[in-house]
Amino acid sequence: MEEYKEKIESWIVKIQNQERMIRQRALKEFLEFCQNESNLTSDNAIEVFDSSYLCLIKCYSDRFEMCRSLACSIITEILKHLQQNDYYLSLLVPVIGKRLASLEIVEESEEMRLQLLKQLNFIINKYKDLNSTGTVKTIKEGEDRLLKPYNEIIDILKVRLMDTYPAILNECCEIIKITAIASPSFHYRAEVLVTPLTTLLKHRHSNIRIVAIEALGIVALNIYTNLDVVRKIVKDISPLLMDPVPFVRRECGRVGCMFLKKLRDRYSLFEQIIPLVLCCLTDEIQEVRDEIENLWIEAGDLYYEENQVELQPLVLVDTIPDNYPELITNRPTLGCRALVRKSLRVLNAVLHEMEDWKEDVRLHATKLLMQIVIHSEEHLTTKYYDINAVLCKTCQDQEIQIAKLALQVANIIGYFVNQKTWSKYAFEELRTRQNKLGIIKCIDALYENSKDKERFDNLYELTEILLDTSICHSDSDKLQMELFQLLRNLIPGVSIDNDNLVKNFYVIALKTTSMAMAYDNKALRNEGINILKLIDTKCNNRDNLSLMHSKYLKATLGTLDLLDKANNEQVMILYGIICICGFEKPFIDVLKQAIKTALEHCEAEGKIKILSAIAIASLNWDKTIGFLDDSNEKFLILKCFIDDCIVNHLIWQAGRTAESVRTMATAALCSLVQGTSKENAMKIVESLMVPLVSLIDDNNIGTRAYALKTFMNSGPLKYDQLKIVASVLWSRLNDPGNEVRVLAAKCLGQLKLMESEQEEFDDMCNDLLKQVLKTMLIHLESPEIDLRNALIESISDLAKTHSSAYKDALNDSTISQDLKSKLPAPL
């Protein structure tokens, strides 16, 4: 040592020199000396420190950063070899505090501030008692070696936690952790660190947020008297459960589990602490879930040990129930479940957050609710009323993931909560609330997982509610689909012995399907038909809806009590019923009366809708009415239906609205004629010849086309009728509509005189048909291929039955030889 004394003295002199380079060179040489392990020992380090610390500490405020940094490094190297001594603490910590603990920036260099903090960290680490294994010894409060510089340390931390340099913030949090271990007196002023640490929770660097959460957890453990501050810490940490960085979320869970095991007065704070843990159990990252689950089990085991007298009797009966929900992979331990059950008051806050305007908050709250439900099991019964109202809203959230989670929660509740309990509240919500979709979704989810043996006992009550017009008359695609799904899940509870229940199911399914049909939703319409078939199969072991319609359609139509008013909603349902059920003998009278009432009172739009339904359904008239043996009875049913429901709307009335109704009535008549036998069709056309002639000459092109299609089913006519029809038909050859022209050409080929009048009017009929043929030959020059082909076909038909008229007309015509070659040769 003697050989270095002179050098040390020389360095000390140079360190105090006015020239920066001399000071800097001396400091570097001194540092190299200290870093050489062979130079310093525990024995001579005291002498080196005592001889040099004054000039070195003075360098802490040197103008030049390099000098300050070198001096700080020399002190740290010497401290490594010094024994624990309160003297060094009382000497160095105030010097560091002078540089760092002031609100005004004294140390401008960020790197130097960090170095000073690292030195402080080193000092605190050095002066905490460690045993040979590296674990902290128990230190009595009176033996606290950091008690004297404690205030300076806290002042430094309080100010530096507001620094802008991330590395400094990280170091401050590390110092907080080591100080809490090293100093039993840490709790004296731990509370002052809460505010600056809380500001770090919003730092842009995720690693700073992580260390800040950890530091706040340690601070909370050391706040003994002010429970409100601990509550505030938990509240401030909670939003970070939605942090995009998984390690931040994991730290929240770690701190939560630490609170559950170590926090003073934790029993009074369980409501605030438990969400920190439960949210991590549903984290997206498996690593986070696994770690927090293990810590959570430890916290539950500790709670069980602390409350063993109360919980031990439950162990004997605590077995996994039958058919445990598949959504729950592992049933929570008894201690964990007991912890949550003790804290069910947290539900109020969770349910409030589920209605927040922010998507991430709603998602976080819904995940938390799921964990509370899983842990609470049957103890949730008393809280179901509050949960149900919020779930009904959340399950139709615009965010699909949130809505899906809400339905999963309802599904789990359906398993744990008694059906009589949840149905009481759910049915009341369905009866009184305006928003039916969410409630039906929840009820469906509840029934889907319900294992209660008596779960179908109140089905009739539910179906009575579902019969409400706000539900089964709804035109919402989503509500219709959910209603079908609910009916599908409830069908196993339907019994043939309960006719009223079967009837309700049928009415609900048919009316909902009819609304889907009215709005041309094929997928929903098919689903509704399948539901009706399932009801029929369940009750009657058939797959034939005809008998079911026969039995219950009258009851369904009886619920449409506003058809005598201009009610568009019920008209739409009637439209769907006509399309789905068609026309069958057992219920045609009831259906016809409903149609007649609606056509008399509804608005033009509704009339068009119903007439279009008739047009669709009557195409199968012979298939549905065809089982009747009496052909005359078939005709009478058809004629009666046309007279009661169609004829009045074929009569001309002024106005475009009346014109549209007339067009659709003509379309319905055309379908009815096409759907019946040829014999009956001829009778119908003959009986309606007068209005048909008028319709062929109607202003609307659609009306004219449907009228001509109807007339194509006509038979031989009386001469007076033939004369009128022929003039109307050949005038249509100049119609502006191509389809009408082609149909008129085809109809002209069907003109034929009745056999009973041939003897009396044969000559006049020949003259008339000659004129018809001349007109047709003139139009044969048309460039339209369709019209020309139709004319050729009709002329050929007339040539067979009226050869002389055809021969005369052909001789008088001036058509080209090419066209003549396409016509049949005169007989």
Image (tube, helix red, strand yellow):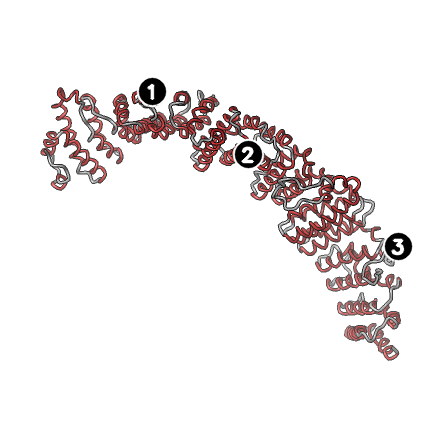
Mark 1 to mark 2 CA distance (whole Å): 43 Å
Q: Is residue 353 left or right of residue 123?
A: left
Residue placed most toward the observer, 630 or 580: 630
To which quarter of the image does residue 397 belong?
top right
Residue 392 lies, with reference to residue 571, above or below; the image says: below
Label 2: how many residues lie within 10 Å, few (<14), some (14-19) or many (20+)?
A: many
Mark 2–mark 3 Cα distance, whole angstroms, equals: 65 Å
**Crowdedness of circle 3 by 10 Å Cα count: few (<14), some, many (20+)?**
few
From the image, state whether disc 1 or disc 2 is nearer to you. Answer: 1
Q: Secondary structure at mark 2?
A: helix
Residue 238 placement (x, y as % from top left): 70, 46
Please state, as top left, top right, bottom left or bottom right, where the N terminus lies in the image. Answer: bottom right
Q: Earlier in the sequence, mark 2 or mark 3?
A: 3
**Residue underneath mark 2:** 437
Specify the label residue 640 is tagged with: 1
Q: Amino acid at mark 2?
A: Leu
To which quarter of the image does residue 600 belong? top left
Viewer-closest of 553 and 767 = 553
Residue bearing the label numbered 3: 140
Is residue 786 visible from the viewing direction of this image? yes
| Corner quadrant of residue 334 | top right
Residue at the image point whose x is 56% and y is 35% from the top: 444
